[in-house]
Image (spheres, grey):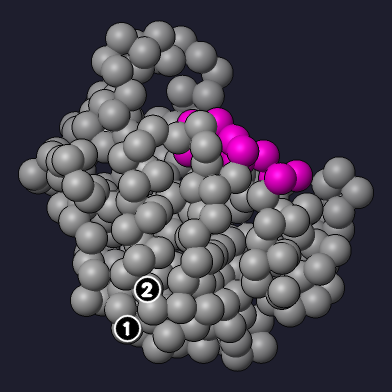
Amino acid sequence: MTSNGTIWTTDTVRSADGTSIAYETAGDGPPIILVGGAFNDRSTTRPLAAELAADFSVYGYDRRGRGDSGDTAPYAVQREIDDVAALIDRAGGAAYLYGLSSGAILAAYVAAEGLPVTGLALFEPPFQVGPHGGAEPGLAGQLTELVSAGRRGDAVALFLTAAVRVPAEAVAGMRGRPEWAWMEGLAHTLAYDTTVTGEGGLPAARLATIAVPTVVLDSTGSPDRLRDAAAATAGAIPRATRLSLAGGFHEVPPAVLAPALRDALLG
C-alpha cells in the first residue's frame, strides 16, 4: 500500500494467546513500534509513522479489538503487553517504543517487564498526580455495561467527560460531527484503555524498574494535569528526561514530534 508517498507493508502476528494482531511497516532503520491511545488504531498513527520512516523501520499496529486485529476475552493488560512482545519479536528481537496517552502507560509497562526495548518515548501518560484527582471508580465496568446495552455513543460521552475531562456541553456538540461514528466504532475498547490507566495514580515502584533510556514528552498546549503527569513520570524512571514541545491539547504535530523523537532516541 502507498499513502502520501510512503510505501506500507501490512501483515499480522500471533500474540501469546493466539490473537491475531494486524500491523503495517514503512521505512528503513532501527525498528520503532507506535503504541496508540484511546480512539487510536494504526491509521491514526500513520502521519507520525510517515515522518519517522526516513530514520526508522516504523511499526504501526491495531491494538486488540481495533481495526483488523482480533480480540480474546477476558481482557487483561498482560495480553496487550504480550501483543507488543510479539511485535518486538517480529521486528527482529528488539525495538524502540513510542506510546501515546494510555498507550504510553502500556509501553512503559512493556519496558518494566524487562522485554528487549532499545529505548522508550512516552507522550503524556495520563497518570493523576498532585491535586488533579484520580479516575472515576468503576469506570471500566460502566463503559462495558453501556456498550453491552448498545449505548456506544453514551460510552464515548462518558469516557470523554470522566477520563479525558471534556466539558459535557462540548461533548454534546461533538455528537453531530463526522468523527463521532468513528469514536463509537471503538467504544468497546475504551474499557481496555481505562483498565490500562487503572485508578490513575503514579505506579512509581513499577516505573522505577525501567532500565532503558527514556524520554517523556508533553505539549505546551496541554493542561497542567497532563504536563504534571509527564514531569512525575520522568522523575520516577531512573534514566528518563522530560521534553516539552509546542503543540495543542494532548497532541504535537507530527512534523514537530518526529524530529524530537529522532534526536532523543537516536542521539
Residue placed at 59% from the left, 35% from the top? 247
For label 1, the crowd category at 10 Å Cα-Cα, with few meaning under 14, some 14 to 19 and many 20 or more, is some
**Is residue 130 found inside the magenta-colored segment of the image?**
no
Query: Looking at the image, is 13 positioned above or below residue 76?
Result: below
Residue range of the region highlighted in magenta in the rendering: 246-256
- Residue 179 visible in this rendered orientation of the protein: yes
Question: In x, y percent, where is residue 254?
Answer: 70, 45
Where residue 252 sits, quadrant-wise, is top right
What amino acid is labelled 2 in the image? Answer: Ile
Residue at point 50%, 66% (across, down) = 241
Question: What's under tag 1, amino acid-wise?
Answer: Thr
Q: Nearer the viewer, residue 228 or 96?
A: 228
In this view, the residue in front, 223 or 144, is: 223
Relative to 1, 200 lies left or right: left
Q: Nearer the viewer, mark 2 or mark 1?
A: 2
Q: Earlier in the sequence, mark 2 or mark 1?
A: 1
Residue at point 17%, 40% (across, down): 131
Q: Position of residue 27 (x, y in %)?
A: 82, 67
Q: How many marks?
A: 2
Q: Main secondary structure of the magenta part?
A: loop
Residue tagged 1:
209
| Residue ID for mark 2 | 237
Residue 88 showing in the rendered view: no
From this view, report whether residue 158 is shown above or below residue 193: above
Which quadrant is the N terminus positioned in?
bottom right
Helix, strand or loop at disc 1? loop
Percent x, y for residue 227? 40, 44
Quarter residue 158 falls in: top left
Q: CA distance from mark 2 to mark 1?
A: 7 Å
- What residue occupies the far left of the structure in this picture? 137
